[in-house]
Amino acid sequence: MPVPLDRPASPIGRRRSPDGTAVPARLPARTDVAVVGGGLIGLSIAWRLARAGRAVTVLERETIGAGASLAATGMLAPAAEHEPGSDPLLPLALESLRRWPAFRDALEAETGRAIDYRPDGTLVLAVGRDEVERLRFRYDLQRRSGLDATWLPGGEIRRLEPGLRPAVTAGIHCPLDHQVDPRLVMDALTEACRRAGVVLAERTPVTSLDWSGGRVTGVRVGDGSVAADTVILASGAWSGEGGLLPENLALPVRPLKGQSLALKTTAHTGTLGRMIWTEQVHMAPKSDGQLIVGATVEDCGFRPGVTAGGLYALLEGARRVLPGIEEMEVAAVWSGYRPTSDDDAPILDVLAPGLVAATGHHRNGFLLAPVTADAVADLVTGGALPKVAQPFTLARFDRPEPRRASA
């Protein structure tokens, strides 16, 4: 029986016509805010603005979460992710992690749907002397940056995770790193948006922006249009694609493909108690019994599909530290596209009057969702970013300063 390739699936239950085809959402002629992109960032912003009383329409070119959100592992791991060059991002990451419990509580309270929020921490592992030296460098960086991280010898690592190989010689314990299940988060966000009155339109690509007097006044969708006071570009890896934005507003965002797989654990195979990182892979146990192994990093544009080489790299990287995977059933394999800016940090800015960008989150979309939603809401409703988000405008790329105006 073929292995399913479609673990990521849209959480929207679209209406169906009698012949079984999808019925497009009925688009309003006008909305307060039009969000281009129905991934985690777009839905989080839409929910936040709808709760503030704005009429919001989300326009998604494919299906909800199809780009990166449903293909993600769901890591909320500012300590494990911290690496040379990422110091400017750290305050934003830590502030967003601080906001996650309230974000979770609101989502679960408004929808009655749990998101498998797990505050179990992360173990970053080393195998062999060379990896230990590189890991020690990372640990020193974490400590200099004020992160909560503890160096552990191999024996202590295996006490925490008995299923690991004896070849694991050292590790860093990052107790404040958390994780969620992306499928459950997207399901809850979709329901929360619906309950807040957000119009969600799948398979509705925006073909162009409407401009009047130097201001964006809405979007073109097929033969029609949706007028909007503010348009928010949250289309992830597609935000840098030509055609929608004029050349002088082009965004330095490109796709980085990632392949992942889900393994089915049992009492016999065992599983992990927390997220595990190595130089090759990361592994995240979920409460439904699946173990997610991700993710390759491929700078190959929008090349679709799952490759034998990618799956081999994931399986071999996982087997290198966790021998029990040899007896785990492969439940699903998939790929997605990370939206990556030139410095791997998000872009939160007014591009032109009436046009806001919220994109480029690289592999930190889930971690940064709460602070991004709040920052963009502040920008739209109050005309300015909060202090913690101000370093992430386009100005940092030494480009001409964008025209400043309230969104």
Image (cartoon, rainbow, N blue to C red):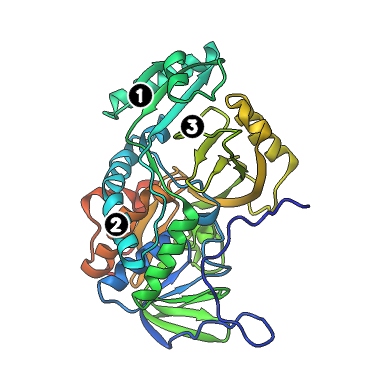
**Marks 1/2: CA distance?**
32 Å
Location of residue 330 in the rendering, given as x and y in whole percent from the top left corner: 67, 43
Location of residue 281 in the rendering, given as x and y in whole percent from the top left corner: 56, 33
Work out whether residue 371 or residue 394 is closer to the camera in this orientation and state it. 371
Lower sequence index among marks 1 and 3: 1
* Whether residue 213 is visible: no
| Residue under the point 60% across and 33% down | 269
Asked if the residues shown at circle 1 and circle 2 are in contact, with their CB atoms under 8 angstroms apart, the answer is no
Circle 3 Cα neighbour tier, 10 Å, few/some/many (<14 / 14–19 / ≥20): many
Label 1 or label 2, whichever lies nearer to me, is 2
Work out whether residue 123 or residue 254 is closer to the camera in this orientation and state it. 123
| Residue at the top extreme, as displayed | 129
Q: Secondary structure at mark 2?
A: helix
Residue type at mark 3?
A: Ile
Work out whether residue 259 or residue 326 is closer to the camera in this orientation and state it. 326
**Marks 1/3: CA distance?**
19 Å
**Marks 2/3: CA distance?**
26 Å
The label shown at residue 276 is: 3
Location of residue 40 in the rendering, given as x and y in whole percent from the top left corner: 44, 59
Label 1 or label 3, whichever lies nearer to me, is 3
For this view, does 107 lie left or right of residue 125? Answer: left
* Residue at which label 2 appears: 105
The label shown at residue 141 is: 1
